[in-house]
Amino acid sequence: MRGIIATASGEAPEDERPAPLVIDAVDAAGQRLDRYLAARIDGISRTRLQQWIALGAVHCDERALAASTRLRGGERIVVEPQPREADNAFAPDPVELNVAYEDEDLLVVDKPAGLVVHPAAGNWRGTLMNGLLHHRPALARLPRAGIVHRLDRDTSGLLVVAKTERAFASLTAQLADRSMGRRYLALAVGVCLPRGTIDAPIGRDPVSRVRMAVVDAERGKAARTYYERLALGRLDDRDLSLLECRLESGRTHQIRVHLRSIGHPLVGDTLYGGAALGGFARQALHAWRLALLHPADARPMQWRSPLPEDLRVLCAAAGIDVASIEARE
């Protein structure tokens, strides 16, 4: 089932934020998360904490928590303080959303390039999350309005949204245990090997706060990307490789950083050294396949998203037959 449900968008530059608060909840058994944190953190009201929780800024074991979560005791809770500008970010806006599938438990969105997924500095409104709250108000009871994973602003393609607490728990667990399948089409500069694995930790670039980078293990998080070369092309006197990339982890800018680290940045990804060949002005990256187990009955489900027109035109200019690739199983 696919439909259009109305938006504005903008860029969310990375900003320097206060260090996360780490709370060892050894004495929290049976308590609600929001009440417990309000008692533990000085100077922050329960209302503000609820807003941070709604934005997905409170998590445990890298999973966002709901305000109503009953703590077992002993959890290690991470709280990411949000600026005052974020206080009204968890609000509905009439953003246009392309819905690829929807049922009682989940919703799959085919995101266009240019749409920010989640409010952040410089983009506190008009994001995909605000659009979800406008079109599906019941999502307000879930962290991040049910958004389970993210795509960069200028990356197009599929992402899944949970509509119930059961679905949110199931989908975040699938993401954590790497059973959720996410595949991307990427157009990289240069001739890549036919296939390969990039296994390198990712952390904040020590030189530029707006970039991520491959760093030492103690300063970054483990990250692994598998890629397969699907086709070769040439544009503006540069060799190009169309790759299918599969993530085992999901770090910020992972594919972009990993491909740059082996000398093959994405076309158009000027942040990571990719040339804007053919006038292409965004990273040439598209989340084209998504597979998961349905939260209600564990039946396998999968979706495909056709390449957007700008990427299709770019590939054609490089002499790459996209139609034959999309026809593959």
Image: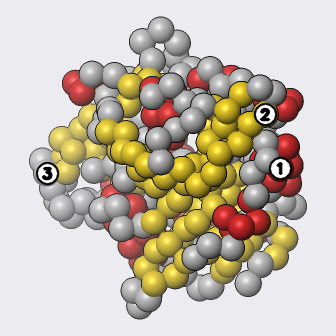
State the image coordinates of residue 60 (x, y, percent, origin top left). 30, 50
Tell me if residue 76 can be seen.
yes
Query: Residue 62 location in percent, x, y?
Result: 34, 49
Give the total number of marks visible in the rendering.
Answer: 3
Mark 2 crowdedness (10 Å alpha carbons): few <14, some 14-19, many ≥20: some
> Do the CB atoms of the residues marked 3 and 1 lie less than 8 Å apart?
no
**Mark in the foreground, 3 or 2:** 2
Q: Residue at x 74, y 71 (%)?
A: 99
Q: Which numbered disc flags the more N-terminal residue, 3 or 1?
A: 3
- Dot 1: within a 10 Å radius of its alpha carbon, few (fewer than 14), some, or many (20 or more) residues? some
Question: Are the two marked residues, 3 and 2, in contact with CB atoms closer than 8 angstroms?
Answer: no
Q: Quadrant of residue 30?
A: bottom left
**Picture quadrant of residue 160:** bottom right
C-alpha span from label 3 to label 1: 55 Å
For residue 316, the mark is 1
Mark 1 vs 2, N-terminal side:
2
Q: Position of residue 121 (x, y in %)?
A: 64, 29
Type of residue at label 3? Gly
Q: Quadrant of the C terminus?
A: bottom right
* In-image side of 186 versus 318 (left or right): left
Q: Is residue 179 left or right of residue 236?
A: left
Q: Is residue 100 left or right of residue 218?
A: right
Q: CA distance from mark 1 to mark 2?
A: 10 Å
* Residue depicted at x 38% and y 25%: 214
For label 3, the residue is: 74
Quadrant (top left, top right, bottom left, bottom right) of the N terminus: bottom right
Q: Amino acid at mark 2?
A: Leu
Residue 235 is labelled as 2
Q: Identify the mark nearer the N-term, 3 or 2.
A: 3
